[in-house]
Amino acid sequence: MEERMQVVVDSGVLGGVVSRFLVGDSLMSVSPTFLLYFLPLLVAISVVYGGTRHEDLGLIIRQAIHTGYWVSAFMGVIFLLLLVIGWWI
Amino acid sequence: MARHSRSRHISAAAEERRLGVGAEPNQHSHAAAPLETRIEVDGKQIDLRNRSLAALLAWLIPGAGHLYQRRRAKGAIFFLTIMTTFWVGFAVGGGHVVYASWVPGDKRWHYVCQLGAGLVAMPALIQGKRMRDHTVIGPEEPGGRTDESYRPLWGGWMAPPRRPVMEDRPDDVAAWYARLGAGYEMGTWYTMIAGLLNLLVIYDAYAGPLSTPISGRKRTDEEAEDGGENASGG
């Protein structure tokens, strides 16, 4: 396990991020499992948003998936941005 | 096969009424046309019936407005989604995240959002009234002090914290945080989001879907031509 972590650390910036999570030195002030609360909310918001944009069930599902993807991607970008800012500060 | 229409269309007759085409000139020719209750979205005809009643029902019970309009699938989806979100948040919050309170030290603005979920959040108003009846206002404590005889209803569900609520003293809110941890925050957010999502549902019941293209791509000339033909009643 430690050898694996050493390889990851040596691989560069991304490896450094991964290794910090592996050793439990979380970059967040809350437990990573706290993020699991986000998933049901994402589903609910996406489904309701999709339902209020279309009447056809297939299009509702498609809109919901599209919305979920965009919300997750947007939050991921913000997370990375804050991560980078955190390294500088 | 008919292309799924991504734009709303009103009937040709309604469009003529709106434009005044074919109407005989009289003193009502400039009066506002009544709201159209039949619309077409995604190739489906929807009868919105009594819009105001549908919106009211949608607020009281998420999805009920759509069931009234015989849009059963969407009504079921909205009901299950919003109710699940609300009750999961309520359970995670230990039954203490939904309450009505507006006193110094405890201005529960979150309840305004939670009230969007309708009837499920209204028992908090009864609990809040009961709390106010058992609270004595004094000069030392602006928010008042709850007397010892106070007993909340329903095992304390949706009951406000006992007064005074002070950040620098152990009180009911501090006890809830200590017992529930992050669950108190997440429960609050879940119930608030359930209420806010229902606002979208209310609008959908009142005015139908706000149909938008899923992708941001521009419509091709062929699609624009098809949309023009559909708008003319073809």
Image (cartoon, coloured by chain):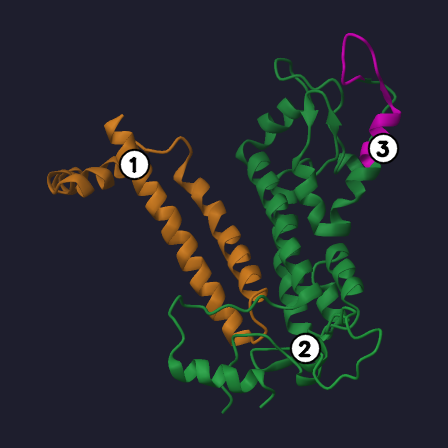
Tell me the amino acid under the disc marked 3: Lys
Q: Secondary structure at mark 3?
A: helix
**Could you tell me residue A77's position as x and y percent?**
33, 46
Q: Nearer the viewer, mark 2 or mark 3?
A: 2
Magenta residue span: B127-144
Q: Residues within 10 Å of mark 1 (few under 14, many from 20)?
A: some
Q: Earlier in the sequence, mark 2 or mark 3?
A: 2
**Which chain does tag 1 point to?**
A
Q: Which residue is mark 1?
A: A83
| Residues at marks 2 and 3 touching, judged by CB atoms closer than 8 Å | no
Q: Which residue is mark 3?
A: B129
State which quadrant residue B191 falls in. Answer: top right
- The residue drawn where x is 19% and y is 43% is A14
Q: Nearer the viewer, mark 2 or mark 1?
A: 2
| Residues at marks 3 and 1 touching, judged by CB atoms closer than 8 Å | no
Q: Is residue B119 magenta?
A: no
Q: Is residue B139 magenta?
A: yes
Please indicate whether residue A51 sits to the left or right of residue A29 in the image. Answer: right
Q: In the rendered view, would you say B145 is above or below B206?
A: above
Q: Colour of chain B?
A: green
Q: In the rendered view, would you say A87 is above or below B3?
A: above
